[in-house]
Image (spheres, rainbow, N blue to C red):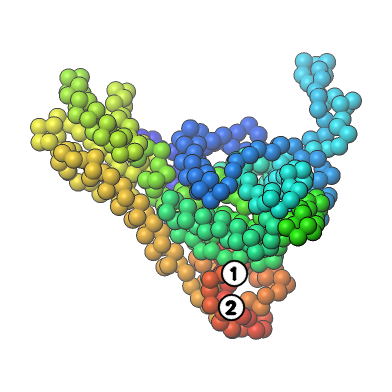
Amino acid sequence: MAKELTSRAENYSQWYNDLVIKADLAENSAVRGSMVIKPYGYAIWEKMQSALDQMFKDTGHENAYFPLFIPKSFFAKEAAHVEGFAKECAVVTHYRLKNDGKGGVMVDESAKLEEELIVRPTSETIIWDTYKKWIQSYRDLPLLINQWANVVRWEMRTRLFLRTAEFLWQEGHTAHATKDEAVKEAELILDLYAEFAEKWMGVPVLKGVKSPGERFAGAVETYCIEALMQDGKALQAGTSHFLGQNFAKAFDVKFVTKDNQQEYVWATSWGVSTRLVGALIMSHSDDNGLVLPPKLAPIQVVIVPIYKKPEQLDEITLEVDKIVKDLKSRGISVKFDNRDTHKPGFKFAEWELKGVPVRLAIGPRDLENGTVEVARRDTLEKETLAIQDIAHKIENLLENIQNNIYQKALSFRDDNTFTVDSWDEFKDRIEKGGFVWAHWDGTPETEEKIKDETKATIRLIPIDGKLKEGKCIYTEKPSQQRVVFAKAY
């Protein structure tokens, strides 16, 4: 296959872009900063979506859908929120085109909207305007709603999956009678995101809260999970926000309590997006292509026949049909690649590039010996196994691969996590990448100076870490605990 990749060591950024395109995951579109997600890439997103959707439903959440267009006036109701998104908003000003007299079209200036519409960058405002009609009494709470949608944030520097002008995501928006209930909801979702990242994606994550400077616009607290990519940069893999009563007050969403009192509701919002596909690629893949965890691989097993004569393929197909039926009965997705337009070597390279966890090869000699060659994508190891009970062996192998991928990523993170106590040590370490635990005096001024001088940001403040006092690496002022710094996507 003429699909060689740039190596990670040579140019990690180019390797990533090459891999996304050559593995047929996505490509750039005619619209600047937007992407076309191709069938194979979308299949990975569908697997993610399916797993997360079930997690949400298992914890009492329901799906709904809200408008793509949001009146501009809605954003003015929550000052911090509009300030956080103002520079990224796409604005609709007209509703009609007309012939320009030259064989083309132009905006009809007479068709100007009375109020401009914002193309959804996030849905808090339109949803809380709606919740005002839905919530009257404590009997209407909690309201646990999620939506799967697209959003637009007019990014200037884009990269496929990681940062695009339009992307796909889910966004949960919940309303509660008490502060404690809302905080518990935000923490519950954080735990769900962490479980999904580790058990499905095979990506170990740290859990914590954002510093005020990194907090979601309009939130009281932002909870997050952070993952470490192979180039030593951090990636925010999911966020869950406790919004307090900010949006309820902005949109006048009150409820009658059991004591017959009027109170504002308490809110959360939370989301993950198609950037998780980028996280998956950068966490596990190698210079040969994608490495996909079996739980999220669109094709878990591919079978390649080795033959010279059509009658040999017929004999192989009879045996393969039994294997395919057995694998499918176990819920394993399998593809029999019997294309006669490509040679086995091409197919091997193609499915290796696409990260299929297990590849089987069967030829006439295998039929005689009752064996099959089994290759695993994560380690590139091959072994010859008896065809008898092969589906059961593959089932166990897929579990082993899923676990191995996670353990490998965990070992990488552990090897690239450091603790520093001085500014010189910090500057040296942060330049080399990885998670760096260091003391910070808690002020936004110090946080900004560290960012300006090193490009490193506070990725999270641990929520389950024990407080241990020390001195800020930058100012040497007192600090209650270490926080996690890294350069990030």
Where is residue 286 shown, x and y percent of the image?
39, 50
Whether 342 is drawn above or below 287: the answer is: above
On screen, residue 418 versus residue 262, left or right, reads left
Please give the name of the residue rendered at 54% of the width and 64% of the height, measured from the top-left corner: 207
Total numbered labels = 2
On screen, residue 337 versus residue 483, left or right, reads left
What element does badge 1 sit on? strand
Q: State whether residue 240 appears in this view.
A: yes
Please give the name of the residue rendered at 50% of the width and 51% of the height, measured from the top-left corner: 279
Residue 345, picture quadrant: top left
In this view of the protein, which residue sits in the foreground, 153 or 332? 332
On screen, residue 252 versus residue 188, left or right, reads right
Question: Which residue, as the protein is rendered here, is positioned at the far front?
Answer: 259
Mark 2 sits on what residue? 481
Q: What amino acid type is highlighted by mark number 1?
A: Ile
What element does badge 2 sit on? loop
Whole-number angstrom distance, CA of label 2 to CA of label 1: 9 Å
> Sequence-wise, which precedes: disc 2 or disc 1?
1
Residue 422, picture quadrant: bottom right
Quarter of the image with the C terminus in it: bottom right
Quarter of the image with the N terminus in it: top left
Q: What amino acid type is highlighted by mark number 2?
A: Gln
In this view of the protein, which residue sits in the foreground, 459 or 307? 459
Mark 1 sits on what residue? 461
Please give the name of the residue rendered at 66% of the width and 78% of the height, measured from the top-left corner: 441
Where is residue 204 shown, x and y percent of the image?
45, 59
Whether 406 is drawn above or below 66: the answer is: below
Please give the name of the residue rendered at 81% of the width and 51% of the height, measured from the top-left corner: 252
